[in-house]
Image (tube, grey):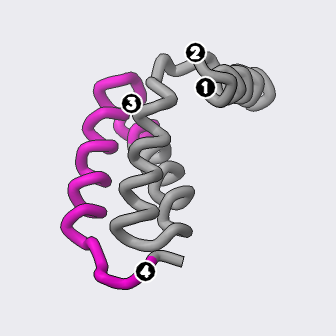
Amino acid sequence: MSDRDETMQTWWHALCAELGVDDPGTDVTQVLDLAAVAAHAVVRPAAPLTTFLVGYAAGLAGGGTDAVQRATDRAAALAEASATTEDPA
């Protein structure tokens, strides 16, 4: 595991503890990949908004890895379909 990956895992677990939630079992890389798709296909500020709304939607749908996967797939498809030709800044 790279230093960056280890740092992200440490942050993930610390954030779960701080927020008083159990680790949802979500693959951190999947979240980062979705953020990258949104940042590059839409504009950079879309990354945190996208990941927040995916988590919110998954929570409203009952939570769990299946709900996260469905929301992630839908968000990634929308971002890719909405890709702009502008340089995301």
Question: Residue 2, how many percent across, how many down?
Answer: 61, 21
Q: Are marks 1 and 2 in contact (CB under 8 Å)?
A: yes
Disc 3 from disc 4: Cα separation: 37 Å
Q: Quadrant of the N terminus?
A: top right
Q: Is residue 60 magenta?
A: yes
Residue type at mark 4 is Asp
Mark 3 vs mark 1, foreground winner is 1
The main secondary structure of the magenta stretch is: helix
Looking at the image, residue 81 lies above or below residue 61: below
Which residue is at the front of the view, 43 or 3?
Answer: 3
Q: Which residue has dot 3 on it?
A: 62
Q: Secondary structure at mark 2?
A: loop
- Residue at the bottom extreme, as displayed: 86
Q: Quadrant of residue 13?
A: top right
Q: Residue at x 46, y 51 (%)?
A: 35
Residue stretch in magenta: 58-87
Label whose residue precedes the other's in the sequence (3 or 4): 3
Looking at the image, residue 43 lies above or below residue 50: below
Residue type at mark 2 is Met
